[in-house]
């Protein structure tokens, strides 16, 4: 009888411990971090492959060649964008971890586990610093989203024309790379729908794949913006509660 009672108490203690641990998880911060990781991974992975596909299309179908000298041509810009993508992936991997750590340390369950504490001025400054930094990142991702929409618009025009070549038969539509600033004004690189290169480009897989990769990269940037908005909301709520009159007693679980 005593053994059954001890076993029941042990099971009850384990369940209470699990519930206590689960209540200590900052779910809103966790969701924002997961969304941030997903958006950054989608943007960086698809953006990198889309840039590689763009190089292939420019060299194969538009006959654009890399400058023999160290000039700032389109291929150099694409290489720079790739290195920026590497930096963004590494930076936001670290920043996502920092957001989660900040979320855990401002959770009421952590206070219950390690004893009651009082938030110092330094702690409030760190919380405010995270709010400012995350807000700046949100604005930066808004700019990235707007910038990523430019190649999506350009590829959509080409892809849409390829899908409707029978409807525009008889006309001589051309795509001039000078309109998009890809090549200098003095260098004429255009592709008309009556040319053989245009038909080959439409039949190839590079155009369709690159277009949809840029669309996925745009969706990833949008997801990162949503994650930043969610993170800012959580951080502001945490900061308000931490600096209230009940500081140290009612820390938010968000």
Image (cartoon, helix red, strand yellow):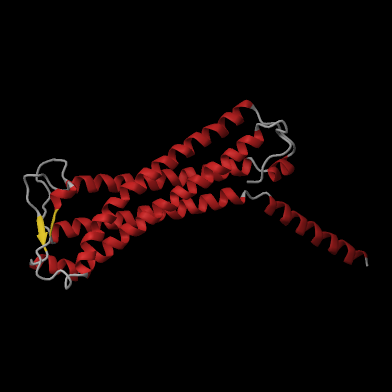
Quadrant location of the N terminus? bottom right
Classify 233 as above or below 170: above
Q: Residue at x 27, y 55 (%)?
A: 153
Residue 161 relative to residue 32: left or right: left
Q: Residue at x 23, y 64 (%)?
A: 159
Q: Name the spot of residue 50 as percent of width and height, x first.
A: 28, 57
Q: Answer with the quarter of the image where residue 58 lies.
A: bottom left
Instruction: Determine if residue 63 is in view.
Output: no
- Please tell me which residue lies in front, 200 or 6: 200
Instruction: Determine if residue 120 is in view.
Output: yes
Residue 41 relative to residue 178: left or right: right
Q: Answer with the quarter of the image where residue 115 lies.
A: top right
Q: Name the spot of residue 22 as percent of width and height, x first.
A: 68, 54
Q: Name the spot of residue 180 as percent of width and height, x first.
A: 18, 49
Q: Name the spot of residue 143 as percent of width and height, x first.
A: 36, 43
Residue with the most extreme bottom position: 166
């Amino acid at each position: 009888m005593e053994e059954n009672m001890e076993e029941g108490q042990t099971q009850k203690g384990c369940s209470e411990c699990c519930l206590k641990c689960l209540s200590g998880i900052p779910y809103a911060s966790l969701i924002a971090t997961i969304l941030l990781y997903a958006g950054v991974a989608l943007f960086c992975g698809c953006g990198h492959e889309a840039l590689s596909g763009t190089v292939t299309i420019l060299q194969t179908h538009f006959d654009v060649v890399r400058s023999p000298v160290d000039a700032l041509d389109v291929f150099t810009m694409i290489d720079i964008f790739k290195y920026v993508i590497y930096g963004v992936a590494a930076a936001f991997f670290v920043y996502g971890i920092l957001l989660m750590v900040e979320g855990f340390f401002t959770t009421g369950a952590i206070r219950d586990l390690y004893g009651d504490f009082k938030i110092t001025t330094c702690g409030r400054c760190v919380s405010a610093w995270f709010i400012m930094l995350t807000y700046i990142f949100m604005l930066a991702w808004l700019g990235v989203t707007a910038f990523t929409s430019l190649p999506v618009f350009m590829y959509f025009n080409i892809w849409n024309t390829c899908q409707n070549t029978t409807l525009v038969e008889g006309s001589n539509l051309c795509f001039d790379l000078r309109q998009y600033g890809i090549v200098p004004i003095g260098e004429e690189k255009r592709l008309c729908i009556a040319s053989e290169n245009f038909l080959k480009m439409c039949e190839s897989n590079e155009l369709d794949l690159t277009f949809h990769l840029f669309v996925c990269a745009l969706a990833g940037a949008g997801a990162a913006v949503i994650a930043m908005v969610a993170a800012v909301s959580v951080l502001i709520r945490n900061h308000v509660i931490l600096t209230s009159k009940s500081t140290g007693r009612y820390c938010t679980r968000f």
